[in-house]
Amino acid sequence: MRRYAVVAILVLAAMVTPPDVISQLVLFAVIYGLYEISIQLVKRIERKRDREEQQADV
């Protein structure tokens, strides 16, 4: 899935920025960083939710 996200973010950066490779890469880095942070936050929330469900079952 991340391969598709990388391609989509690169295409988005190419459309939004002027025809300058540096601008495109900077925008890509920011958006991809936010994407990875959101994945990590979802993992953390899911682990916490699973632990709470296990404790409620006991």
Image: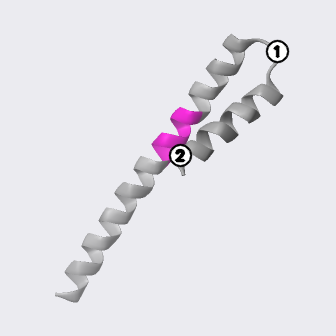
Q: Which residue in the structure is indicated by mark 2?
A: 2
Q: Residue 45 got which mark?
A: none
Count the labels in the image: 2
Q: Which residue in the structure is indicated by mark 1?
A: 19
> Residue placed at 54% from the left, 52% from the top?
1
Task: Using residue 44 as the reference point, say whether residue 39 is left or right of it.
Answer: right
Task: Tell me the element at label 2.
Answer: helix
Query: Residue 6: within the magenta?
Result: no
Residue 6 lies, in percent from the top left, at: 60, 38
Above or below 56: residue 47: above
Residue 19 lies, in percent from the top left, at: 82, 15
Above or below 17: residue 10: below
Residue 14 lies, in percent from the top left, at: 77, 26
Determine the image quadrant of residue 11. Answer: top right
Query: Residue 35: within the magenta?
Result: yes
Q: Earlier in the sequence, mark 1 or mark 2?
A: 2
- Disc 1 marks a residue whose amino acid type is Pro
Closest to the observer, 5 or 46: 5
- Disc 2 marks a residue whose amino acid type is Arg
Q: Which residues are magenta?
A: 32-38
Placement of the C terminus among the 4 image quadrants: bottom left
Closest to the observer, 37 or 10: 10
Determine the image quadrant of residue 47. Answer: bottom left
